[in-house]
Amino acid sequence: MSKYFLNRTIRISLLVAVILLVISCDQNKDKGIAMDDSENTNVLLEEWTGPYSGVPAFDKMKLEDIKPALEKGMALNLKEIDAITANPDAPTFENTIVAKEKSGEALYRVRRYYGIWSSNVSSPEFRKIQGEMAPKLSEFNSKISQNKELFDRIKVVYDNSLKNPLEDDQQRAVQLIYEGFAMNGAELDAEKKVRYAAINKELSTLYTNFSNNILADEENYVVYLNEDQLGGLSESMIKSIAKIAADKGQEGKFAIPNTRSYMSPFLTYSTERSLREKVWNNYYSRGDNGDEYDNNENIAKILKLRKERVALLGYDNYADWRLQNRMAKTPENAMQLLNAVWPAAIGRVKEEVADMQAIANSTGDKITIEPWDYRYYAEKVRKQKYDLDSDEVKQYLQLDKLTEALFFVAGELFNNNFAPVPEGSVPVFQEDVKVWEVTDKTSGEHIGLWYLDPFARPGKRSGAWATTYRGHSTFDGKKNVLGSNNSNFVKPAPGEALLISWDDATTFLHEFGHALHFFSSEVRYPTLNGGVRDYTEFQSQVLERWLSTDKVINQFLVHYKTGEAIPKELVAKIKKSSTFNQGFATTEYLASAIMDMKLHMADPTNIDVDAFERETLAELNMPKELVMRHRTPHFGHVFSGEGYATAYYGYMWADVLTADAAEAFAVAPGGFYDKELASKMVKYLFAPGNSMDPADAYRKFRGRDAKIDAIMRDRGFPVPD
Ligand SMILES: [Zn+2]
């Protein structure tokens, strides 16, 4: 179809937020010097062997190997750095930057396994090791980022490059590495460096505590229902919550766990208002219950330490420091975007609440809409206004067919071919993981492997994410890409089709967008694969748009029994409902994004986190009928690490580009399959990674900067003058 139409699903993108934490690992080094030849019996440290230029030995992972492997990997990396700094020759790009790009290969390999344990196959035993290793890894990072001799050499190369410029991508690599060091305390004097490292170590423990407190509140609060309290719930949900109760020793009851994947459908469908309130309260009070798992104190400490750390570097606040090398550049630029959309979002909430209240009144429910009513009555409005039955849509969304759709889109836009590797030829960490070989459709040239881990299981974290086991680079011989996508679909019975929701299908494409970003990389140096946090969601968000193109609909959105394509009327209904509930989705997101930024621009000296949240929301005129998507005490993006601290705005920043780029396809002669525009997109927005300034790259693609208009149209908001 000539125009994309579906719900932008900022919601979805947020569900998969954590991915970037994983993606960010890709910025780490990709290869290194040869290992010590002595006593290398630890399989996690070993070079990858086997087919496809070597693949991780996922079938040989043993938990007892991880700690010694990490320790040895760190020691080896430090040795490599020592070799660079001990070089008697004057610093050059080759003997300093290239040498650094090559270093850390063994540790990089160990960390791939560590990541699998942490995200895909976790256990209490692993988490114990993780708790022990987090501060050690932090100390190790400080040892490198604060290595004066190393930084001095980098600075010489950088200063020389300003006088005698290197090739463009080399110049950019030097600049990014130099800035990375400067931003992380390399220029501080000895005394300040000690304090800097101590702060980071303390933070690493606070981050772990923060996450564990949320986990504890998710595990400790369960709402049990009796058989007469199941009104409104679907058969599949009832089955699932009966099993959870039985597993918890409450046979005959029904358990609602305190997680988003149960809270959200329960609040949408349950007719039991007082139970909705209870479930809502448990969920939005995580980390805020005034007990041993309360996070308010942790947050205050984190904010103070972050502020103290950036003050050592001469910055006013954490946000100024963090955004300097983002696309937004300054917190003011980011806030300007958030503030521009906010009035339209809360204006829409007013209309949505009025619609919901009217339905409540007409059905005789004597209530005023409260936050635990929003999803429930919104669903009623959706049925009434759009007559869209999500169960009907599901019948046309089979995971296998959608996987074929991904390959089709990759073939059309990226000229990639995906073919399953022979069963058993590539080791996997779990039998459900499947592997495909990616090649160039025209030349047949090998590009890499795509690993898909589709199903939920104990020990796997929730949500969906993408990561690489090996990134592309050519500076030291061409490296093929090992990329992976991970989801949490419920595994169907053998031979049964797995039907998923429209939202989940969108997320499936989203993650594949990250994977295509990995596979299309053409950078020379590993550092240039590094993402810019407010830009790397663009590549994934934009791919979501292909789900609703005619070619995908007609070939792959077919009924799981009859094989017939999804009816035009149903597609029309989906299209019509695309802006539905955007007041809710945009407002809950923006409230969190604004809070993230304001918390880090404020003076934390005497901060009362709870009061700060309340007062900030009051100033914003936050509608009382909904809450922040992530309230501060459980805002894991921001406080369980630094990956998304003052970066939550990035989803909307990237979505401005996404909406604007999608409009370019909508009007292109070949629509979403326009060859010329697609190749421009791959060339400028996917392949260069961070070897080109993202704003310049976007201008090359679009001929101008992105405008806010498209995102406003997408969400059904008025376009500002
Ligand atoms: Zn993403």
Image (cartoon, rainbow, N blue to C red):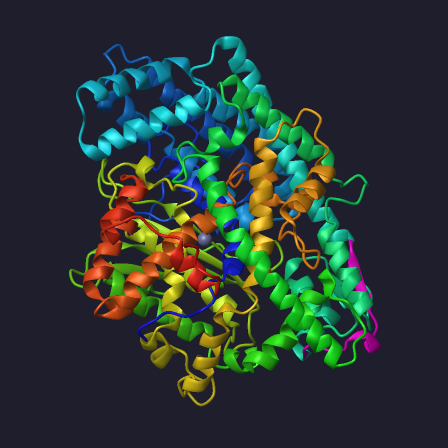
Q: Position of residue 710 (x, y in %)?
A: 39, 59
Q: Residue at x 43, y 42 (%)?
A: 533
**Mark count:** 0
Residue 136 higher or lower than 226, as above or below:
above
Depth check: give the residue in front, 269 or 627: 627
Depth check: give the residue in front, 428 or 250: 250
Question: Which quadrant of the structure image shows residue 254?
Answer: bottom right
Q: Position of residue 290 (x, y in %)?
A: 81, 41
Residue 66 seen by the camera: yes
Q: Residue at x 73, y 81 (%)?
A: 362
Depth check: give the residue in front, 557 or 277: 277
Q: Quadrant of the C terminus?
A: bottom left
Question: Which quadrant of the structure image shows residue 239?
Answer: bottom right
Question: Which quadrant of the structure image shows residue 363?
Answer: bottom right
Residue 242 higher or lower than 571, as above or below:
above
Q: Residue at x 71, y 56 (%)?
A: 624
Q: Which residues are magenta?
A: 221-234
Task: Please state if 295 lies on the left or on the right of 500 as rendered.
Answer: right
